[in-house]
Image (cartoon, rainbow, N blue to C red):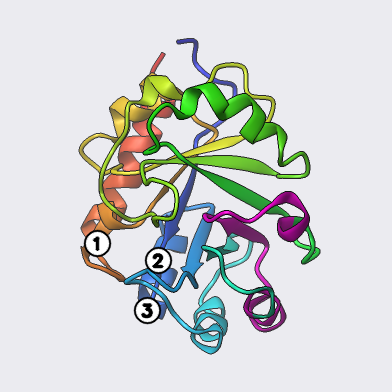
Amino acid sequence: MARPQFRTRIKFCGFTRAGDVRLACELGVDAVGFIFAANSKRRIAAEEARALRQALTPMVSSVALFNDNPAEEVREVVRQVRPHLLQFHGGENEVFCRSFGVPYMKAVAMGDAGIEASLPALLGRYPSAAGFLFDSHASGGGGGSGKTFDWSRIPAGLQKPFLLAGGITPENVFDAVCAVRPWGLDLASGIESEPGIKDGDKMRRFVEEVRRADCTE
């Protein structure tokens, strides 16, 4: 595949400690994610995320992740945390996702059998999405599983940016970027020692491998 004319963006997700947020920013990531999904081991409250947001450096975005959260919970996070982007992983529809006045990205559950046939219609149902995220979980599940999916199933010719997620690690990210050439990458478990606790060495190696892939034809 031809070398892209941009660098691969990096989003580290599932932060619970301010020191990890600061290190991610120092390493040059583009965004950090805070998880509010009820079924996540990395879930934090809006008050905690607001405190963690203070550790962000300029020009690093904050992302709030939800999975079928009630509208009032999303509104409270938007009010307290002031995220730059929302990320929806559940069955939220277009009207719901755009109703909070913040750009949003919609996750696509690539763990569903035969989803390729319905992808065009699915993507078309979210015309105002800033982009899409292809993850390895099945519908109703959450991210952070540490499992990959067959990257060749991602549809060609997408007209919007997309992030690759699901089982991406410092060991396989070079191959992932070279094979898929995604606009960005999103990961949590691949840079952790345990859920919500980031490993500094893994974060550093991940960024190095992405930049190495960006320089490869």
Disc 2 element? loop
Q: Residue at x 56, y 64 (%)?
A: 68
Between 4 and 50, the one nearer to me in the picture = 50
Which label number is shown at residue 17?
A: 3
Q: Which residue is mark 2?
A: 14
Question: Residue type at mark 1?
Answer: Glu
Kindly indicate the quadrant of the structure image that contains residue 203: bottom left
Residue neighbourhood size for the residue with mark 3, other residues' Cα within 10 Å, grouped as few (<14), some (14–19), many (≥20): some
Mark 2 packing: few (<14 Cα in 10 Å), some, or many (20+)? Answer: many
Q: Residue furthest bottom?
A: 47
Residue 135: % across, % down: 42, 42
Horizontal side of residue 132 vs 104, given as left or right? left
Question: Cβ–Cβ below 8 Å for labels 2 and 1?
Answer: yes
Q: Which residue is mark 1?
A: 192
N-terminal of the pair, mark 2 or mark 1, is 2
Q: CA distance from mark 3 to mark 1?
A: 12 Å
Q: Is residue 210 left or right of residue 162?
A: left
Q: Amino acid at mark 2?
A: Gly
